[in-house]
Image (cartoon, helix red, strand yellow):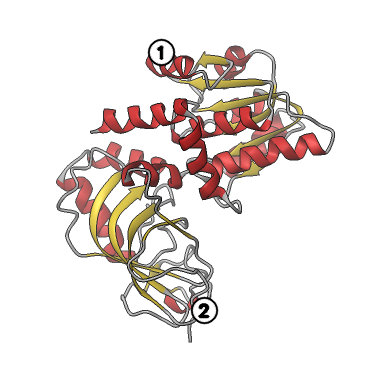
Amino acid sequence: MTSPYGLHRVLEPAGVLPQQAWRLDASPGCGADEVVVDVERLNLDAASFRQLRERHGTGAALRRAVLDIVAERGKLQNPVTGSGGMLLGVVRAVGPASPLGLRVGQRIATLVSLTLTPLRITDGLAAWDGTTEQAPCAGTAVLFGRSVAAVLPADLPDELALSVLDVCGAPALTDRLVRRRAAEGRPVGSVLVLGGGGKSGSLSLAAARRAGASRVVALVPTPGEAARVQTSGLADEVVLADARDPVAVLAAVGRPVDLTVVCVDVPGCEHGAILATAEGGTVVFFSMATSFPAAALGAEGLAADVELLVGNGYVPGHAAFALELVRSEPAVRALFDHRQTAQA
């Protein structure tokens, strides 16, 4: 009997959900409410990819590291960052009780983490050179009854669509928070995005502006990135600082903001985000490198009356919202295209 949560795929330890499990059953048989996918491409999340590249470099060593994780665990879950990514593929089989509304032959992107997705790799990642987060891949993956997936749009290149869908939770939640506070009579006048030049960062800048924020600030680490974001017009202010340096972040931002969105893929950015946020404001962490103890204890130690939120990557309608931002905001599309060109 299958479980919509994937409990039947957990091999060890018993009684936990797939994301927490050490090892999953990744066999490609299709259960009653499952969907089996022929994988074409993996998209490693930014924090995991950075950590793996820093440790293993590129090429054969990096491929072997990823293959070893998947072979040992039946899923892709970086043992250091705890994170994984998502994938693109073609629906191979759909169980008769699957509620996902998918059909055999559809090309989809999974909107659930590879840390809970049963995965087999059958080609040794032979076509991946390790220089980009996206890895061409042959293999199979399994979705559960409570999984989420999006049919790939026909009007966008696969690589672009996958990059957008990988981070679509960030702009959707940014939009929700700005609009919710306005409805509560606490309008968000100012929004700061740490990592405003990245994928989730640029989308969050556009979402904040569209939702009605009157001051949108992008913090980036290098002059080159600052110039690109400035040219894009997505932010009212573009400031330069190391997001891991709390004092430098506060000095760069100046007047504290109502909402800070953390989209930086390195650890140590919690305290700067808290310092840059006004009393009664909100900080939302979208980086898998975030430390909950550092954030919670840091806010306590700074006597900061700020709301701390963890972005879980899912907001109803998040995929369609992010794809429409890319379609309708040329500046966002240009930043995505630049990233893909730079990595090519």
Q: Residue furthest right?
A: 185
Residue receiving disc 2: 3
Residue receiving disc 1: 223
Left or right side of 276 for 85: left
Mark 1 Cα-neighbour bin, 10 Å: few <14, some 14–19, many ≥20:
few
Nearer to the camera, 221 or 150? 150
Tell me if I can see residue 216 in this picture.
Answer: yes
Q: Which residue lies furthest to the bottom in this view?
A: 1
Q: Residue furthest front?
A: 155
Per the model, the C-alpha gap separating discs 2 and 1 is 50 Å
Tell me if I can see residue 200 in this picture.
Answer: no
- Counting from the top left corner in percent of width and height, residue 118 is at 37, 67
- Counting from the top left corner in percent of width and height, residue 265 is at 44, 36
Question: Is the residue 135 above or below the residue 2 in the image?
Answer: above
- Counting from the top left corner in percent of width and height, residue 75 is at 36, 63
Discs 2, 1 touching: Cβ within 8 Å = no
Residue 121 occupies quadrant: bottom left
Q: Label 1 is placed on what type of residue?
A: Pro
Residue 45 occupies quadrant: top left
- Counting from the top left corner in percent of width and height, residue 149 is at 46, 60
The C terminus appears in which quarter of the rendering?
top left
Disc 1 element:
helix
Mark 2 Cα-neighbour bin, 10 Å: few <14, some 14–19, many ≥20:
some
Q: Label 2 is placed on what type of residue?
A: Ser
